[in-house]
Image (cartoon, grey):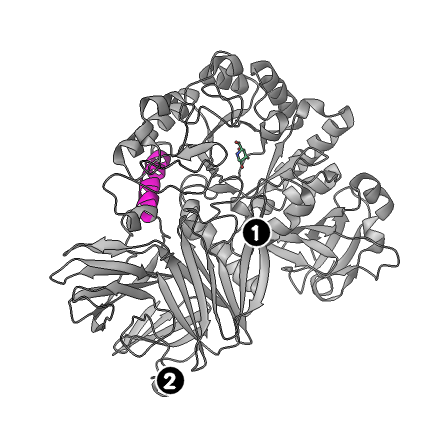
Amino acid sequence: MIKRKEQIIRLDTLNTTLVIKADTAEYLYYGKRLANGFDFGAYAGGGKKLFSAPGKDDYTEYSVLLENSDGGFAADFSFSKLRILPEKPEIPGLPSSYGEGKTLELKYTDTTRVALFLYYTVFDDSDVIAVSARLFNGAKKDIHIRRLMSLQMDLPGADYSVVTFEGAWANERNKVSREVGSGIFVSDSKRGMSSHARNPFIMAEDRRGVYAFNLVYSGNHKETVEADCSGKTRVLTGINDFMFDWLLPVGETFCTPEAVMCFAPDEDTISNRFHYFVSEHIVRGKWKKKERPVLVNNWEGTYFDFNEEKLLAIAEAAKRTGVELFVLDDGWFGRRDSDTCSLGDWYDNLEKTGGGLASLADKIRALGLSFGIWVEPEMISEDSDLYRAHPNFAMKIPGRTPTRLRHQLMLNMTDERVQNYVVRVISDVISRSGAEYVKWDFNRSMTDCYGKGIFPGEYFHRYMLGYYRVVSKIVKKFPFVLFEGCAGGGGRFDLGNMCYFSQYWTSDDTDARMRIAIQAGSSYGYPQTVMGAHVSACPNHQTANTNSLEARFNVACGGLLGYELDMTKFTPEEIQEVSEQIAFYKENRKLLQFGDQYRIDEKYVKGFITVSKDKSMAIAVLNQTVAFPSMPLVTVRLKGLSETSVYDVTRRDGKGGFTAGGDLLMNGDLPLCDLFDYDTVSKNSGGLCSRMYILKKRKN
Ligand code: DGJ
């Protein structure tokens, strides 16, 4: 809801209030929802600004930096007008959130007649506010945008801890918390992707609560948090200004990606609010609310070494256990027997697929499984027919040896001919195989940015515009297909991509131990509905750890369950166990995929509990990650249950049942020693004790 009284605008979400003073471009308040109207008189003049630019006696990191038409960097934006729009405007060329709600549009004009527009959308059903900026060049000369952040939030106080989600390939989104102190904290990506290293989701926390920010963008991003000398803290988020220099001709507009923000009293509530927002206002299309199939993916089962016979054998074994979708990963096209060649040659390798994709897909379907296919559309191998025919499609700087990563180059997606080519060939792969699922991979960072006629400072963002054009065209063409995004695991695990891909491969690390932290880190800003999570073989291929099949399944139930191993190698006992797992999963899939998930984050116990919307049922996975002699009593508190209900608690294997009130389960430090049955669990698990519990509300 947006209400206005003169120059004061009050934006209310379900549980928060944001108050803006339009004429002075200030935030008067952002936090817990206020009960009372418009009495903000004493708060005016706090100096918490909506935007900042050089030239106005403000020396904190700026949200706007222009090489202005008068030759200087200074800008003096003064208030011109505001509108309350009944609908949320789309951002041309960029993905953004959607849904019912009003938008505040504010316009500020510089003396040169460059206009800055700010947009704040509040949805009727969510606590997340969407913010973006636009710059219109109404001056008499072209200008250069050196920086235009999507959001500036000046927070009261200078004692924030900033929480980021960091890592590397196969070790993404580990939670890191640090005090900002008196310096400037920067988290960013310069890789042309949102990156494994630093996710755009960040939080700023102090005694007031938690402010969280994310960006609906998949390219270079930057978040800065700076405590200034007047006791305020400025948070900026947007496109990274690293190598960014956008020429804005007279009469044209530049639109930033959308930033989203939320306030909540604690981290669990922030996650809850973001989970809802992502599920309702980011993910879209047919799969938004549809239960996702249990899949088997052949990557870790075969890597490049497969033929039709092997694939069908895996599919048959998978079908026997209850798997619903077979995904053919990398290696089915061109002469692709290793990662050194063939990217771009999206025609069937007949030796490996039998009679080609169409006939293989038919055979898979005849077994009773859906068919899914892997592609990596933005890449090109130098050893490919595509490269031999169109070397100029590759992203490289004339006269320089390009950097090869995983032996491959990228396509120059700033070029419309390349974009159209990709749309055509990838659409053809999907059409001819009739794929019901597509995994869209992206396996390298961007290095040799160059496109004929493209101004270098514009390249990274123009690439993203090209990428979004291609992916949106393909996704629109195949509305019934389930698209899963992937970037060497979770390298582009961001809200921009989630506008197109209903789910995302969380990480190339499939080790249950590592996944506990990776999935927990991811869950701060993203719901389990978007997180691919697979059971793979042991010893694990990334870490050599061995965990029980039960532990691997339990952890994968924190996301969207799949299996990624050669199922023909299962013993009869394992087939039985996996069949039971999948049967259980299907029975409880709605709850596991769409229930409210909370992290369990005790000293020795990590995991999650997923609670049905009506709180009548919950599934908890508790993983004891360390064990040593004379351990203190290991206890756990559950979350999200009804305080006033009584629950029957049983272990998935039927052992160890008991009954307790929701309030006791959430506050009573439940001792795990008897429940866990360590002897059995550690025999199979090499130390990771993992148990799944089912909680059912007692009927009175
Ligand atoms: C990286 C992905 O994350 C893996 O799952 C797999 O698809 C490989 N690429 C294939 O090259």
Q: What kind of residue is marked 1?
A: Gly
Residue 235 on the magenta span: no
- Work out whether 362 lies above or below 251: above
* Numbered tag placed on residue 43 in the rendering: 2
* Badge 2 element: helix
Residue 530 is situated, as x and y percent measured from the top left of the image, at: 51, 45
Residue 138 falls left or right of residue 494: left
Q: Is mark 1 within 8 Å of ligand 1?
A: no
* Numbered tag placed on residue 145 in the rendering: none
Which portion, as a residue range, is magenta? Answer: 461-476
Q: Residue at x 29, y 65 (%)?
A: 65
Q: Nearer the viewer, residue 136 or 372?
A: 136
Q: Quadrant of the C terminus?
A: bottom right
Q: What kind of residue is marked 2?
A: Tyr
Main secondary structure type of the part rendered in magenta? helix
Does residue 698 appear anywhere in the picture? no
Q: Quadrant of the N terminus?
A: bottom left
* Badge 1 element: strand
Q: Nearer the viewer, residue 360 or 135?
A: 135
Residue 478 is situated, as x and y percent measured from the top left of the image, at: 37, 32
Residue 108 falls left or right of residue 342: left
Mark 1 surroundings: few (<14), some (14-19) or many (≥20) residues within 10 A: some
Q: Residue at x 41, y 22 (%)?
A: 384
Q: Residue at x 73, y 50 (%)?
A: 623
- Work out whether 139 lies above or below 372: below
Q: Which of disc 2 and disc 1 is earlier in sequence?
A: 2
Residue 304 falls left or right of residue 606: left
* Numbered tag placed on residue 167 in the rendering: 1
Residue 676 is situated, as x and y percent measured from the top left of the image, at: 81, 50
Residue 472 on the magenta span: yes
